[in-house]
Amino acid sequence: MKKITIAIDGFSSSGKSSMARQLAATIGYAYIDSGAMYRAVALYCLENDIITGDGIIDTERLEKCLPQINIGFEVNPVSGRSEVTLNGVNVENCIRTLEISNVVSRVAAVPAVRHAMVAIQQQLGIKKGIVMDGRDIGTTVFPDAEMKIYVNADAQVRAERRYKELLEKGQSVEFDEVLKNVKERDYIDMTREESPLRKAPDAILLDNSHMTPEEQNEALLQIFKRITNA
Ligand code: DC
């Protein structure tokens, strides 16, 4: 069967990564989490004092350093998942913290960072057969994607999911802090000048506030089957 490109965009903590990964595994496509790439750049910025914990960025230095920030993916031999690398080092476990979440939207709003990441993402998807999730996949990265999904859920519901996830990872966080971060990232992602989070006109809206993960996965699979006549 001819392979297609699948773009899944949406708000932070909307569960889009889990459903995108699951869909890719079910249909035998590659999965790329584009948010992980921006998180890895944010990690580089924190490690190299390009951004302060309060989110003040030295944009000029960041632009100068960009050629030395190599972002890639490698497959974890145990889980079979693709994991993000920063200059050849697997940083998958270091990028899912609240510290990174607090600054990543600001790093992702820098046009030069976006241009560099979009170029890598387009290269990764050149052969199709890919599910990529993010904020601008259906609008900027793959505007011609055959299947586009726009995921949303209440901010409160999304914060509860992210809070649970962080607690399960043993991170000590306050719920209010997580909710504040979710709302702040929504605002920055939607109002930035370069490729803001928007529903592509041809994207299918999926509000999963009241859906179980199984229901979401099934809904996505049905859309895929309909689009590919499978
Ligand atoms: O999906 P996530 O929460 O891991 O993404 C982290 C941040 O990266 C998010 O705040 C916005 C940004 N992002 C983006 O601007 N464009 C993308 N395609 C993916 C993520």
Image (cartoon, helix red, strand yellow):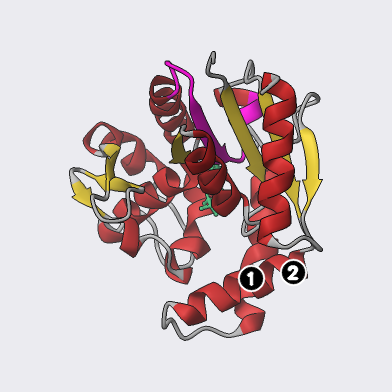
Farthest left residue?
88
Seen in the picture, residue 145 relative to 106 is either above or below; the reply is above
Whether the residue under disc 1 has CB within 8 Å of ligand 1: no
Q: Are marks 1 and 2 in contact (CB under 8 Å)?
A: yes
The residue drawn where x is 47% and y is 32% is 29
Point out residue 223 in the picture as x, y percentages from the top left corner: 73, 33
- Give SS at disc 2: helix
Q: How many marks?
A: 2
The residue drawn where x is 76% and y is 71% is 156
In the rendered view, does 49 fall on the left or right side of 163? left
Q: Is residue 136 visible?
A: no
In front of the other: 44 or 57: 44
In the rendered view, does 3 fall on the left or right side of 176? left
Q: Is residue 82 visible?
A: yes
Magenta residues, as a range?
A: 125-139
> The residue under label 2 is which amino acid type?
Val
Which labelled disc corresponds to residue 119? none
Is 130 covered by the magenta stretch?
yes
The residue drawn where x is 54% and y is 15% is 1
Q: Which residue is mark 1?
A: 161
Which labelled disc corresponds to residue 157? 2
In front of the other: 108 or 25: 25
Q: Dot 1, crowdedness within 10 Å: few (<14), some or many (≥20)?
A: some
Seen in the picture, residue 61 relative to 187 is either above or below; the reply is above
Is 35 covered by the magenta stretch?
no
